[in-house]
Amino acid sequence: MRIDVLTVLPELLHSPLNWSIVKRARDKGLVEINIVNLHDYASDRYKSVDDYAFGGGAGMVMMIEPVYKAVEELKKERDYDEIIYTSPDGEKLTQKKANALSLKNNIIILAGHYKGIDQRIRDHLITSEISIGDYVLSGGEIPAVVIIDAVVRLLPGSLGDEQSALADSFQDDLLAPPVYTRPAEFMGWKVPDILLSGHAAEIEKWRHEKSLERTRRLRPDLSGD
């Protein structure tokens, strides 16, 4: 998989994309992540990527020209399955959406900034818009990292245990069950006996019941009750 991130603040992306599971996937060659500085595609000597909005109003707007030039340059080398814009009014990022994106080959993510982007970018270049929640951030770099992390961990070979991602919360519209590790008793607080029984079928039954219970209690919108 190849992911290109278009940003006006590339420094925000280098560190979080070079640790943990994403770094492991990059080192293994499972994903190539390319950070594109939109200032490099500016046409003036000040490397401007934003300007005042037509019609007035507060805030600056990301200009169409640097984004268009960057996208066209990337498309000379490969075809892209998705060109995603991180936007608070986009489709909510879900596990199902992450699953679908993990099956793609080449993705561009445009990290929004300032007051927003020229609407013509959204109309003519963007194929989908994704939000990570109903709130506004200073820029789209953090949402871009969230999307990348959610997608890359699903790539075969990214996790040490291939089954781990399949047991994550939301994979089957259920929250994950409680988990425990050693010691079996601490400060008088004990691990449930069933988990120490060695009965695999009964343990799985317990875990499923706990998942249902937690989902109904914490996320009734998922349980359908």
Image (cartoon, rainbow, N blue to C red):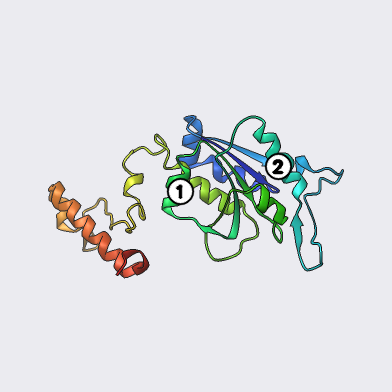
Q: Disc 1 residue type?
A: Ala
Q: Nearer the viewer, residue 25 or 105?
A: 105
The x and y percentages for residue 48 are 81, 49
Q: Are marks 1 and 2 in contact (CB under 8 Å)?
A: no
Instruction: Choose top left, top right, bottom left or bottom right for residue 210.
Output: bottom left
Q: Position of residue 221 (x, y in %)?
A: 37, 67
In this rendering, position of residue 96 left or right of residue 127: left
Residue 185 visible in the picture: no
Q: Residue furthest front?
A: 124
Question: In the image, what residue type sits under mark 2?
Answer: Asn
| Viewer can see residue 137 | yes
Residue bearing the label numbered 2: 37
Q: Which mark, residue 98?
A: 1
CA–CA distance between discs 1 and 2? Answer: 25 Å
Name the residue: 26% across, 65% down: 213
Q: Position of residue 111 (x, y in %)?
A: 64, 50
Q: Which mark is residue 119?
A: none
Against 192, residue 83 (above or below) is above
Q: Of the two numbered discs 1 and 2 on the same chain, state the one appearing first in sequence.
A: 2
